[in-house]
Image (spheres, rainbow, N blue to C red):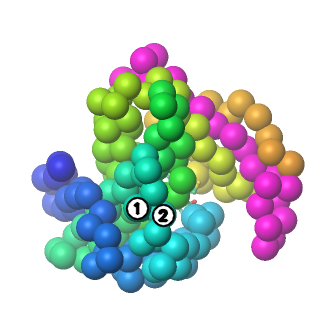
Amino acid sequence: MGSEASARSAFVIRVFAGAEDALQVAAILRESTGAATWSEEALRETVKLPGVTAYVSERKGAISGVVVGRQVLDEAEVLNLAVTQGTRRQGEGRALVGHILNRFVQHQVSRVFLEVRESNAGAIAFYRGLGFEAIATRRDYYQDPKESATVMELWLQKSTV
Ligand SMILES: CC(C)(COP(=O)(O)OP(=O)(O)OC[C@H]1O[C@@H](n2cnc3c(N)ncnc32)[C@H](O)[C@@H]1OP(=O)(O)O)[C@@H](O)C(=O)NCCC(=O)NCCS
């Protein structure tokens, strides 16, 4: 758990609380081009899977962002990430990913990877700023619309989280 104290970024990060949060989070994912649009049901099921961790950011009791990740042995993947359009560029995405990276460090993860649409320049710049590097392309990885994925990775022991 953590909080950002300045007036510019008055949000808190907390663990995704399951069924109660799924409605708001599904709505954020629907409005966030570039995020995977999971239904409430898909969210509830995903967070029950082994190794899956999710955090939300909250402002005045309303959820404004989400990150979901999964650990398998000493590797982990960022499965989904979104911040509401009205609260972007205020450090919320960085704080969400920072929380999940901290958890991964505590659980002996050495390598984190993720896929992002090739055209999602904003998210790619965001992840580069956190130390992720583009390492590969997965051709036609996405549907609707069809697009290739850029695979990015971060070695945790080399980075400062
Ligand atoms: C990607 C996303 C989560 C970033 O959230 P955010 O809260 O706006 O990010 P932050 O404010 O923590 O940004 C931290 C830094 O990342 C970089 N960054 C963030 N968004 C950026 C953008 N659109 N273009 C370029 N750089 C960006 C900047 O360096 C920024 O620092 P600055 O604002 O001081 O310049 C948000 O844009 C989003 O929800 N996008 C839609 C969903 C999506 O694409 N998800 C990724 C799926 S793989």
Residue 22 seen by the camera = yes
Labelled disc at residue 48: 1
What x and y, as percent, mark residue 83? 43, 64
What x and y, as percent, mark residue 98? 35, 41
Whether the residues at callouts 1 and 2 have beta carbons within 8 Å, the answer is yes
Residue 31 seen by the camera = no
Locate residue 83 relative to residue 128 in the image: left or right: left
Which quarter of the figure has residue 159? top left
Q: Quadrant of the C terminus?
A: top left
What x and y, as percent, mark residue 89? 41, 57
The foreground one among 62 and 40 is: 40
Residue 94 part of the magenta-drawn span: no
Q: Which residue is mark 2?
A: 46
Q: Residue furthest top?
A: 158
Residue in view at x 64 percent, y 37 percent: 152
Span shown in magenta: 140-161
Residue in view at x 52 percent, y 79 percent: 39
Q: Amino acid at mark 1?
A: Lys
Q: Amino acid at mark 2?
A: Thr
Residue 148 part of the magenta-drawn span: yes
Labelled disc at residue 101: none
